[in-house]
Image: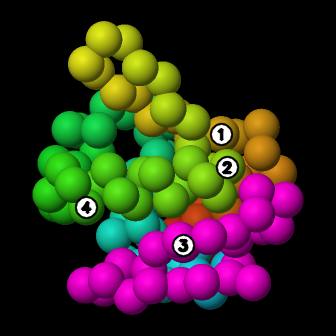
Amino acid sequence: MLKVVEETNTTLIEQMPNTRPIPVEILFSSRGRIKIIRLLAECGELNISEIARRTQLNHSTTRRHLLFLERAKLVQEKTFGRIRIYRYKIENLRALALRRFIELWEKSE
């Protein structure tokens, strides 16, 4: 069973088996998460400070969203000492489809 906790405009998943995909309505339930997805789909990879700056989110909120997206297998974290780089996982079919959707949405009128 999925247990969802609402916390200041951010939906967090507390318990979920890794075998079950995260429901799309939870993935898109946060404006901050959508900003991060769009940014990483466009740029490929950035460090957490740059993601926070470009999305105008604070560091802890950005980190929480990135952890969620990592759990959803849309991003991957690479650590170099204290520097954390987040990479959009284009090899994931859902991430690829999401990127194509964003590109289509941005181009169409």
Amino acid type at image mark 1: Lys
Camera-nearest label, 2 or 3: 3
Locate residue 88: give its quadrant.
top right
Q: What residue is disc 2 on? A: 73
Dot label at residue 48: none
* Residue sitting at x 30%, y 11%: 81
Verify CB contact (< 8 Å) between mark 2 and mark 4: no
Camera-nearest label, 4 or 1: 4
Structural distance between the alpha carbons of marks 2 and 3: 14 Å
Structural distance between the alpha carbons of marks 2 and 4: 18 Å
The tag earlier along the polypeptide, 4 or 1, is: 4
Camera-nearest label, 3 or 4: 3
Q: What residue is disc 3 on? A: 13
Q: What residue is disc 1 on? A: 89
The secondary element bearing badge 2 is classed as loop
Amino acid type at image mark 3: Ile
Q: Is residue 64 above or below residue 8?
A: above
Chain part drawn in magenta: 1-23
Q: Is residue 108 above or below residue 5?
A: above
Structural distance between the alpha carbons of marks 1 and 3: 20 Å
